[in-house]
Image (tube, rainbow, N blue to C red):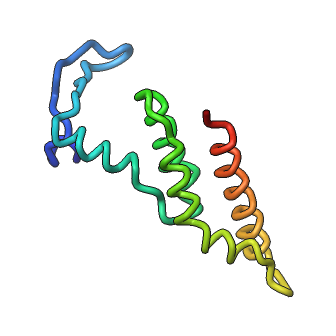
Amino acid sequence: RLAADGLITPDRTEPGEAGPERTVYRITGEGSRHLKTWLTEPVTHVRDLRLAFLLKVVLLRRSGRSPVGLVRVQREVLAPVLEGLARMPDDPDAIDIWRHHSAVAAEAFLDELLAREP
């Protein structure tokens, strides 16, 4: 899909370790622009912190950039959701309890990321 969208292009092939040759791709100029934008966009759901957000933090660090801006924006975007989920209903069921604890953990995670960044 990335190649079809013009974001990557085949660069070379190399022997596979235990199978057929594999194609190595390189990012295009358009792909670089999309990547730079994507790396600054916060996720919209708490559940997306685990994969998409963490990937963005790792990629930012690997590229020598600080994730602080992304973490701050992420904290702002999720603040209303985290605040709502932090309040436990009077008679919580298992889902309410899970959401509550996930929200508390997500908030602590974002706060600690900010605290640990220079």
Judged left or right of residue 32, residue 82 is right
Query: Residue 84: horizontal and vertical position, in percent?
Result: 68, 77
Residue 77 in the image: above or below residue 70: below
Query: Residue 114: horizontal and vertical position, in percent?
Result: 63, 45
Judged left or right of residue 108, residue 49 is left
Looking at the image, which residue is at 44% across and 27% down? 64
Of 118 and 14, the residue lying toward us: 118
**Quadrant of residue 62 in the image?**
top left
Looking at the image, which residue is at 33% across and 19% down? 19
Query: Residue 12: horizontal and vertical position, in percent?
Result: 17, 19
Looking at the image, which residue is at 64% across and 51% down? 110
Query: Residue 38: horizontal and vertical position, in percent?
Result: 35, 50
Which residue lies most toward the front here?
118
**Quadrant of residue 95 in the image?**
bottom right
Look at the image and tell me in which quarter the C terminus lies: top right
Of 1 and 49, the residue lying toward us: 49
Looking at the image, which residue is at 48% across and 49% down? 70
**Quadrant of residue 59 in the image?**
top left
